[in-house]
Image (tube, helix red, strand yellow):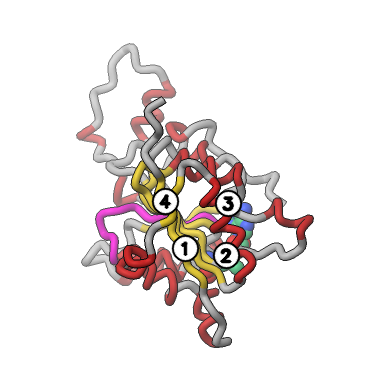
């Protein structure tokens, strides 16, 4: 259950500095406090970041994708969201120790993990158009029809993904469950804000290779000689009307 989970009131209220301490704005760069600054503005300045999160891994599990992506996208902030407390703590510890091992190169400062239910309040965390990539890797299949509403791809959630993704941004999906693959393709194809990415473009995308081989669930599927179904969707420009 997730009733103890805390959500920011809005993206402006989210303090990312504990997650990405190396990206905290240097106090010298902040505008001078003026008499008109109220406490809230001051607090936001204290927690201001040089850069926003741009890459999101939904249901990141043990973080295999995160730690593989971060060094490949060194100028982007990569975030995993995971609902299980212990799994989130495991990933946070994994990142802490990678940061410590790579202190000289500053690698892994650009990756972090937060405990959250991504089916709730995603737009409270991210501004409209903030993200360029959302990964949905091996989501729980929820086989039974009455559980389908628990699936992480649905008409309602796709509208939230469309909101936080910038035009041209990509939703990456992968699963070993063919029925779930068809479900995700169907719901994303139906959505007016998305178009499917061609197979050629999909194959040349380095992130597809990484998401196919680097997640813990993907490795398990590999060991069991299972199939993997991939589909990518591009966030379209907002229509002019
Ligand atoms: N993506 C990882 C991988 O490929 O190895 C993990 C896949 S695992 C089958 C699905 C993960 O999604 C689990 O770790 C689960 O706790 C997480 N999850 C399920 N529902 C979620 C939600 N609403 N918000 C955040 N995480 C969720």
Residue 157 visible from this viewpoint: yes
Mark 3 crowd level (few <14, some 14–19, many ≥20, 10 Å Cα): some
Queried on whether the Cβ of the residue with tag 3 lies below 8 angstroms from ligand 1, the answer reads no
Checking the image for residue 19, the label placed there is: 4
Instruction: Give the mark nearest the N terminus, 3 or 1.
Output: 3
Residue 72 sits in quarter: bottom left
Which element carries disc 1, helix, strand or loop? strand
SS assignment at label 3: helix
Q: Which residues are magenta?
A: 72-86
Residue shown at the point (25%, 31%) measured from the top left: 30
Q: Residue at x 54, y 87 (%)?
A: 223
Whole-percent x and y of residue 32?
24, 23
Q: Which quadrant of the figure contains the C terminus?
A: top left
Name which residue lies at 72% across and 65% down: 143
Residue highlighted by disc 2: 181
Label 4 near label 2: C-beta < 8 Å? no
* Coordinates of residue 85 in the picture (x, y in percent): 61, 59
Q: Tell me the tag on residue 187.
A: 3
Q: Are marks 4 and 3 in contact (CB under 8 Å)?
A: no
Q: Quadrant of ligand 1?
A: bottom right
Indicate which disc, 1 or 2, sits on the residue closer to the N terminus: 2
6 inside magenta stretch:
no
Label 2 or label 3, whichever comes before in sequence order: 2
Question: Picture coordinates of residue 68 (x, y %)?
Answer: 37, 70
Are dots 1 and 2 in contact, CB under 8 Å?
yes
């Amino acid at each position: 259950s997730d009733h103890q989970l805390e959500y920011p009131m809005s993206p402006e209220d989210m303090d990312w500095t504990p997650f990405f301490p190396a990206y905290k704005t240097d106090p010298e760069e902040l505008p001078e406090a003026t008499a008109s600054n109220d406490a809230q503005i001051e607090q936001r300045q204290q927690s201001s970041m040089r850069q926003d999160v741009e890459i999101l891994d939904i249901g990141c599990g043990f973080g295999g994708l995160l730690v593989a992506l971060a060094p490949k996208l060194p100028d982007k902030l990569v975030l995993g969201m995971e609902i299980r407390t212990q799994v989130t703590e495991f990933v946070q510890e994994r990142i802490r120790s990678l940061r410590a091992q790579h202190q000289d190169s500053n690698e892994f400062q650009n990756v972090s993990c937060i405990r959250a239910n991504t089916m709730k309040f995603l737009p409270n965390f991210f501004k409209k158009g903030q993200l360029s990539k959302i990964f949905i890797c091996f989501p729980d299949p929820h086989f039974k029809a009455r559980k389908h509403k628990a699936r992480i791809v649905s008409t309602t959630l796709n509208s939230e993904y469309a909101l936080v993704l910038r035009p041209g941004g990509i939703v990456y999906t992968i699963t070993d469950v063919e029925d779930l693959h068809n479900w995700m393709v169907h719901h994303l194809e139906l959505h007016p804000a998305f178009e499917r990415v061609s197979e050629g473009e999909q194959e040349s995308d380095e992130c597809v290779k990484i998401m196919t081989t680097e997640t813990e669930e993907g490795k398990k599927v590999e060991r069991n000689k299972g199939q993997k179904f991939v589909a990518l969707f591009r966030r379209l420009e907002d229509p002019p009307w």
